[in-house]
Image (tube, rainbow, N blue to C red):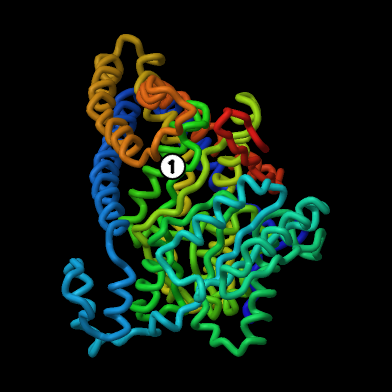
Amino acid sequence: MTDLEIPLEKDRTPRYRFFEILPGALSWSLLALPFILSVINVTVAAVFVLVYLLVNFSRAIAGVIRALQGYHIMRQHQQLNWQVMLDDLEAGEVTTEHVKRPKWHLAALRRLDEHPKSIEPSQIIHAIVIATVKETRAVLEPTLESILNSDYNMEQVILVLAYEARGGEATERQANELIRDYGSKFRHAMAVKHPSDLAGEIIGKGGNINYAGRKLLEYVEHEGIDLKRVLVTTLDADNHPDKKYLAALSYTYALCPDPIRASFQPVSIYNNNIWDAPAPMRVLATGNSFFNIVLSLRPHALRNFSSHAQPLAGLVQTNFWSGRSIVEDGHQFWRSYFAFDGNYRVYPLYVPIYQDAVLTESYVKTLKAQFVQLRRWTWGASDVAYVVNEGFFKKNKVPRFDLITKLWRLLEGHVTWATGPLLILGAGFIPAFFHPQSFAANELPLIVSRIQTVALVAALAMIFVAIKTLPPKPARYKHHHSLFMILQWVYLPITTIVYNSFVALYSQTRLMFGWYLSFVVTEKAVVTQDKEVII
């Protein structure tokens, strides 16, 4: 089996370090460029700023269109009778007449002779791996209940509760109690303890689910189940799958032309506790949900993120997940991509998995926890060096053009994450600072302000999506609390700068200097009806 692991810190060559430095070096250089160009030639500086803003303006408008389309598709898919559609697939024809079906489903039935199913829906077994460290029962129990409330037969579902030994005796006792209380409701259930300090691993979710995945494999092989039948979904402790998720996933998997070389990505929506989270966290959570909806309509750019599904047969070929990356979800895309020599695809599922906005016991701790969470996400810039190393300096059959295109999207995405908000908000004023008498320099801020005004339509679209995806208001909040869901958007410029640009720059700068991040679990709090916060 090909070694797909990230090199240990001591084994990283100067070449590898060069590409770790590259994202941060490009980000800082791009931030410095308006100053440098303003000193050299004010006209060139003005043109650079204007072109950059127009490119990002067009992206913002395209994002608005995709977000509204994506929201509409997501709502449609949540209303479909997936179980009837699965019955149709099983039979190869329409089984009942009274249920309305989408045209694409009827077209898929007509194509079955030409493009047969890869597996019968009734043969699919779902394994759901829930990673936990010290989360309380108040966090984990709603996750288990959401799975059990699925419009799906639980006799086709295996539950794996993956917990950390470093969580202590309380964590182990809780895991075993949950399996005792809920296990009989599934086909099979097991609690798997991930030992501390395994060789070659760093602390993180990757090592935990990696270990649990291997225990799952032992069970499946012992039961004589074909690995292709088992579809593995990884969840964080606070992830609540939509009731249509398992059925929609089964449908997509059954029709997938090459399911072993594929994974399946639902839409992550951060609104479980949106009414309880502080306003800045609500804005960030909604922005992340908005981005995930947009990305679902860009399959060519889609990568594994947070909760996702992959067949056990495919996981065996990728040697499961990485135990050395703190961003094991996005990194799993690249492991799979190279394991299958580029013949690998992520399929979007237009059905959500609901997750928590960041919330802990106090306002200040919540602000810090949000920074820590986004710091981990932006650490995905470390994949640039991995992709270059695996793609260009190891033998593989990955198509060069496809590799270069994906590498460019990865690098450009992280650089824009760090620099985009700062350049959009501030770059238009830099030429005038150096050349206060220049007509072009003084006109630039006016042009920029008009572009930014029109671009506010993107913020309005985000507010629309936020309102439409809001869960019902808890009874513990009065009616006027709904007004805060609108007023909160005054935080948008601040959260964009502090929790996007600054966090991304922080991560990339640490990577430049080799100050590697360790995994820090984001604390998850639950607010009771009495507004008591439980950690």
Q: Position of residue 311 (x, y in %)?
A: 51, 75
263 relative to 429 in the view: left or right: right
Residue type for callout 1 = Asn
Residue in view at x 50 percent, y 61 percent? 148
Q: Position of residue 248 (x, y in %)?
A: 37, 66
Badge 1: residue crowd in 10 Å (few <14, some 14–19, many ≥20): some
Q: Position of residue 42 (x, y in %)?
A: 33, 23
398 relative to 255 in the view: left or right: right
Disc 1 on helix, strand or loop? helix
Residue wearing tag 1: 288
Quadrant occupied by the N terminus: bottom right
Instruction: Give the answer, above or below, for where 129 lies relative to 365.
Output: below
Residue in view at x 26 percent, y 35 percent? 54
Quadrant occupied by the C terminus: top right
Residue in view at x 38 percent, y 58 percent? 301
Q: How many marks?
A: 1
Q: Is residue 155 visible?
A: yes
Q: Is residue 19 visible?
A: no
The image quadrant that residue 506 belongs to is top right
